[in-house]
Image: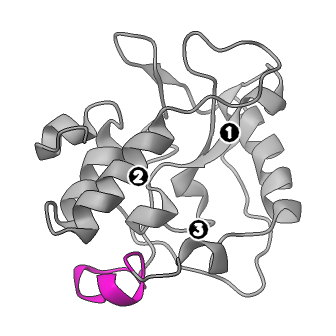
């Protein structure tokens, strides 16, 4: 069960991160990064439910822009979270990523839902983040809004292992 976060905050404040070197990356068989489940289990936005899809994440015109914390908050959190994970490479090449994406009803600024996601295999140093997880998030969002997957199933699948989320839900790559 993914914990419920506080939801969007106005204004946002910098959230405390886990202690330095207390979180440890996991990796899939092909080297894709996964977060430490004890540090980053995910957290959900209480405003997004199966019943509210039409007025939240599936709303025409977007939803996530209005709830995303500002960079002056997330930049500080990203640096602190990198210490939590012992990430020492360039932060330019890592993404401060929501485990359960905002487009799937993830909490915008709960530290349980954010992690410094290191680059995927094959990344060119200095090229900025390369995050194949983003495409998975988009396909899951499309499936939820089309009624091909429930919100809770998609949230659980991506929080468990983003690399297997589509196969877990039986969603083909369209």
Q: Is residue 99 above or below residue 93?
A: below
Asked which quadrant contains residue 10, the reply is: bottom right
Where is residue 95? Give x, y as percent. 68, 39
Residue placed under numbered mark 3 in the picture: 108
Give the image quarter of residue 45. bottom left
Q: Is residue 88 left or right of residue 99?
A: right
Say what secondary structure mark 2 lies in: helix
Which quadrant does the C terminus fall into?
top left
Q: CA distance from mark 1 to mark 3?
A: 15 Å
Please, which residue is most extreme toward the right here? 72
Near-viewer residue (131 or 155): 131
Residue 143, horizontal then vertical, whole percent: 23, 59
Q: In the rendered structure, which disc, 2 or 3, sits on the residue that comes first in sequence?
A: 3
Task: Determine which residue is flagged by label 2.
Answer: 138
Does residue 56 belong to the magenta stretch? yes
Q: Is residue 86 left or right of residue 142?
A: right
Residue 136 in sight in this render: yes
Where does the magenta region start and end?
46-58
């Amino acid at each position: 069960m993914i914990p419920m976060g506080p939801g969007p905050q106005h204004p946002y404040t910098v959230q405390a991160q886990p202690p330095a070197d207390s979180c440890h990356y996991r990796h899939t068989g092909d080297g894709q990064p996964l977060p430490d489940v004890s540090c980053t289990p995910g957290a959900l936005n209480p405003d997004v439910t199966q019943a509210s899809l039409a007025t939240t994440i599936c709303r025409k015109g977007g939803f996530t822009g209005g709830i995303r914390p500002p960079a002056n908050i997330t930049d500080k959190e990203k640096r602190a979270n990198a210490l939590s994970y012992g990430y020492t490479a360039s932060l330019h090449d890592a993404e401060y990523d929501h485990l359960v994406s905002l487009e799937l009803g993830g909490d915008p600024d709960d530290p349980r839902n954010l992690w410094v996601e290191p680059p995927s295999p094959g990344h060119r140093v200095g090229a900025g983040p390369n995050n194949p997880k983003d495409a998975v998030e988009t396909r899951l969002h499309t499936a939820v809004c089309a009624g091909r997957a429930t919100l809770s199933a998609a949230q659980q699948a991506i929080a468990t292992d983003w690399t297997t989320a589509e196969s877990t839900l039986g969603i083909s790559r369209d």
